[in-house]
Amino acid sequence: MSAFEQPLPGKRRLTMLRSLLRHALERGQPPAASASFDPAHLTGREGPIEFVRDKNGVAHIYAEVEADLYRVVGYLQGRERLVTIEALRHLAAGRLSEWLVNVKIPASVERFGGFRVGEFDGFLRPLGFEREAERDYAQLAPEMRACLDAFADGMNAALAACDGVYPAEFLVVGSVRPWHGRDCLLLARASALVIALMPLENELTFDNVRNQEGDAIARILYPDAPWENAPDIAPGGGAGIPDSPFDPPNMGSNNWAVAGSRTASGRPIFCNDPHVPLIPAPTFWHHVHLECPQYRVQGGMYPGFPGMGWGHNGAIAWGVTTAFRDAWDIVRIERLPGDDSLYKTPGGTGAIHKHREPHRSRFGKIVSLEWESCEHGIIYPDWRHHDGCDLALKVVEADGALHFAGHRALFAAQTVEQTLAALAQMNRGPFDFNLVYAHKDGHIAWEQIGQLPRRKKDGLFIRNASDPDSLWQGYLDFAENPKIINPANGVVVTANSDTDPQQFTKIGTRVHCEPRYRQQRVTDVLLQQSAHDLASMQALQRDLHCFYGLELKRPLCEALELADLPEKDRVAVSLLRDWDGQFGTDSVGACLFFFTRQALCVNVFMNVLGGESAKRFTHGQRAIPRLDRMLLDEEDRLRQLLLLRTGESLNAWIVRSFRQALRRIRKVAGPQLAQWQWGNLHRVRIGTVLADVPGLSRRWLALDAPMPGEANTVSPSVAIPFGGKMRAFVGASTRFICDLANPEEAWFSHCAGPSADPDSPYYHSLPQQWLRYEYFKSALWPADAVPDVIERYRIG
């Protein structure tokens, strides 16, 4: 019987509960005695293995057989981040109800409130990611399958080692089932999905505004949309298409490469700080160093999938940001009268296929999930346009086997040509990334990763399936993807925006991506000097300068200085006027700017728009940039629309929003201006899910502190409401710098350690250093040269 088929120990719930209570009653920091790795539990190895863990939690793994590296990594992830991995596995499979319960999420829950868990399954199961993983697993070359099978063996060894005492979160979720190698490919889809949903949500919001408000209003709200491509389909009817159950937060990242002509060492420097959720712990990225005869590589592995989003291998350093690829198209399906199994296509008619699968809910009955499909995508039962026409959702295909092959090739790449060959394989995978890399010989480049549909026009507008523009003509070849190679100015920068506006039309539209604030700031700083080094790169990664805020405060203060405000409020206006643009934790001006801008955004769009479209647009990615544009342009048509809809000018709304912001600040921080510092109203809390459970938080809380930054500062914080204050939800969970003058070493800062176990010596070790922007060095050291060793095992 294979490890995939062996039953796992059942939950020993009483022991798990006792362990939970023991942790809850303990005081102080956990003991630094609980190691994560136990070689006695690792079975099936094919050769000698050496495992070394340093004080920063980095696992250095050395093996004579490549698959054994993945066996150890699988074991570590099973021991240290099981809750995150299992949640992602059930999410991508569309089986959350089996793991949780098909309950309705309270409306108070940020972003997901009001939906039932089963609605997530109903959206995801038809996309067929499980079937895709099975197909791609079967196509793996033997050596690649051996690696994923070894990873799964390690996961199962970790689960068996629990002996039924699983993490405390498993007291309230379903049974634990064995891992299979194909699950690794499913987990790659899960991580990619969270990113890919943001452009889809932007499209859904765009169409909702068109239908509920009409194109005259939509053109004002979306002036950058490619309106010249709009199809001849009149929007209207007051009804928007159904909302997806997913409303992901803005998640950006920064990466850049500086040519040797601009560095003190004369070699390129590469930097990456991917912005992903800071909670729950452990950190999203699993920092490992792997060595086998085929390669030596160090970087950040995904949960459950042994590829690296960032890393270095002695020749190149690379990292990613989200490209905001338009990977989705929504198409109107016009069924034939009298035969709803056929619909109109450019070539005549196409077939519609019906699907039904059993849907199990934990503690609930088995029901059927039903949907339809056609050449144009998935037809969900309740997805209809404003006139009742069915809608199909099409998503870009992916090949998980080629994607994993690309990662292995990238680990081993020593030349630019080998790097490009690896990226061409990764391009076929599920992710859409801006991948920037630097080579020790001086080459720097940006390559867009992720297949791009070959469209006749954009994919933003909903078209009839009978429209030839609705069809994809395959995908662009990797060589056709947007790229920048060795630019004359010596810098390559991406930050989730239109990296190169002239090439971005291949990727998406301005409706799909983030504003250019971070990209502009990073580029400006890099071009200010020609002798960059580690210190200047660290300074840029901790940069909190809100240059756009300095521009925006001018119209805000002009309106406020004309208003009839009491003296205590005028003091606040003076603090805003004198603000230096820094989003540090001690800044009162930053706090006033943030909450005034936020209140103004809600006031403007909730009054300009109506009903559901107002809520969706205000909550979406494009609201703040659209507000900023209006503030800086006195001729902006949105100003006239606001006056027409409300009878009040923009200046009047600025004053009202400022007063609302002051009331909110005073309610939370009190009347004293000295207490209005940004860090008093904006905090970061890092811990597992249990850290937010009353009575348990002390034990599982690794960090609770004031947090600097906002969504578009280089050092960012995408915050959500939490107890009257703001809580950092997305941030630079990892910071990575590699000077290719010394390509075998790099510098790192992580928001959390690698383990979700509060007894682990790594659980509390890194968050405070990360908050202070402190870095540690890690390198492709030989096993006997690793410093500050906490664990060391030699097997075989």
Image (spheres, helix red, strand yellow):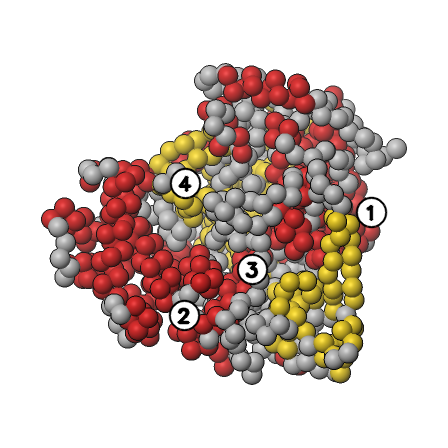
Tell me the SS state at disc 4: strand
Mark 4 or mark 3, whichever is nearer to me? 3
Residue type (three-letter) at the residue carrying disc 4: Phe
Which disc number belongs to residue 538? none
Residue at (27% x, 43% y) in the render: 665
Measured from the top left, where is residue 152 in percent x and y? 75, 37
Asked whether the viewer can see residue 579, the reply is yes
Q: Are marks 4 and 2 in contact (CB under 8 Å)?
A: no
Residue type (three-letter) at the residue carrying disc 3: Asp
Q: Quadrant of the N terminus?
A: top right
Measured from the top left, where is residue 557 in percent x and y? 20, 58
Q: Mark 3: few, some, or many residues within 10 Å (few <14, many ≥20)?
A: some
Q: Is residue 33 above or below residue 438?
A: above
Residue at (53% x, 80% y) in the render: 234
Tell me the SS state at disc 1: helix
The front one of 319 and 738 is 319
What residue sits right under mark 2 in the picture?
221
Q: Can you tell which quarter of the image residue 652 is in?
A: bottom left
Furthest residue in direction right, as rendered: 1
What residue sits right under mark 4 in the picture?
722
Q: Of the residues under marks 4 and 3, which one precedes in the sequence?
A: 3
What residue sits right under mark 1 in the picture?
142
Residue at (78% x, 76% y) in the render: 339
Tell me the SS state at disc 3: loop
